[in-house]
Image: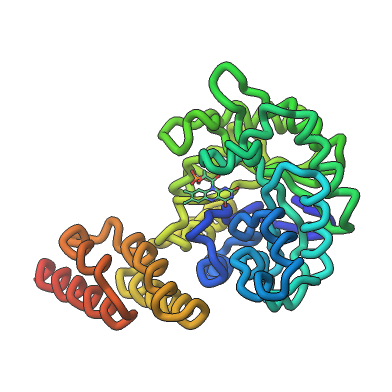
Amino acid sequence: MQIGNVTIENGLFLAPMAGATDRSFRRICRERGAEFTVSEMVSAKALCYEQKSTVFATRSKSAPLACVLARENPMAVQLFGHEPELMAEAARMIEACDYMGCKSEVPPVAIDINMGCPVNKVVANGEGSALMKDIPLAGKIIEAVVGAVKLPVTVKMRAGWDADHINAVELARVAEAAGASALFVHCRTRQQMYAPGVNPEVVRQVKESVRIPVVGNGDIYTPEDALRMMQTTGCDGVMIGRGALGNPWIFAQTAALLRGEGYELPTINERFDTAMEQIHEMVQHKGMRVGMAEAKKHAAWYVRDVRYAALTRDRIMQAETPEDIRAVYDELMAMQKQAEA
Ligand SMILES: Cc1cc2nc3c(=O)[nH]c(=O)nc-3n(C[C@H](O)[C@H](O)[C@H](O)COP(=O)(O)O)c2cc1C
């Protein structure tokens, strides 16, 4: 499939996840088969307002989220907001790499618009999935962003607001007419938040309703899930979120399955080494305190289904340095060896 002039051969996308898909994890996934990544969501309003003051801009929390390194492309920077003009202004800044508080080396290859976030704080402002309740405004936002930049614009949406208002097809048509280049469809309603139970039929209906590429998202935890999403809906690609946390190998495994080949599971050694590589990089980027606070979640995800891992969860959560995590992993290794002996 194509987004603008970027070809995404296998259609394998890493989903944006605030607090999880930072630069380090995106790199880890890219090196293991994810072909396209999306930044954590960035508030258009915060990005624009902070730039009006050198002090705020240099301490901005939004600007680093929008930062793109040359080796990261193809990636999209995702914006959320409800004001078409501010969304357009933020998109222009990102395209031009023209803002303080971040050293973007290059622009992303696309701007993505968040119309799926279910969080109360966001929805209360009429943003994220609340836009699915106001399709005319959603259309104006997409039009404004498309008009502001040369980059392709993508839209990430849900199935609808609730079970009585499944309107992804309506939003998809409006998005296409407004100039969107691709759609990411998380096939749950806002009311469902992240509860189990997805509705891939909505992805199929959206795919049938528009000509632009449609990427299916929701509850893909195995390569077989990914293949099923593609086969049952006809979608052009899949976007994987929680299924990639602690398991970035899912992308290469899915690519192998798509080629009709088998795939291998990572060894425990490989898991621990990958986790440590990511944790060290996070600490390097964000400093020990913030880096470790975020890295601990990843450290636990990497051992989710390893034998005896439950016994070490508390120690992982109390770790203060990468070495503390390595010590827990070494102990887990020793426990595996002892159990096998
Ligand atoms: C912790 C977390 C943070 C998320 N942050 C974002 C975000 O910033 N932007 C967005 O569009 N979706 C966000 N999502 C939604 C995911 O991109 C994805 O649509 C959702 O998790 C369903 O896919 P999955 O079942 O593969 O996880 C987030 C999800 C989680 C679990």
Any part of residue 185 in sight: no
Q: Could you tell whether 87 is left or right of 22 in the image?
A: right
Q: Nearer the viewer, residue 59 or 205?
A: 59
Residue extending farthest to the top is 164
Q: Position of residue 126 (x, y in %)?
A: 65, 36
Q: Nearer the viewer, residue 25 or 145?
A: 145
Q: Residue 295's quadrant in the figure?
A: bottom left
21 over 156 or under it: above or below: below
* Colour basis: rainbow
Please name the residue shown 33% across and 80% down the image: 322
Q: Nearer the viewer, residue 339 or 113?
A: 113
Q: Position of residue 336 (x, y in %)?
A: 17, 69
Please name the residue shown 62% across and 22% down the image: 166
Please name the residue shown 82% across and 52% down the image: 88
Report the quarter where the C terminus lies. Answer: bottom left
Q: Position of residue 312 (x, y in %)?
A: 19, 65
Q: Residue 180's quadrant in the figure?
A: top right
Q: Residue 44's quadrant in the figure?
A: bottom right
Any part of residue 309 in sight: yes
Q: Nearer the viewer, residue 340 or 249?
A: 249
295 over 204 or under it: above or below: below
Q: Position of residue 123 (x, y in %)?
A: 58, 37
219 over 191 or under it: above or below: below
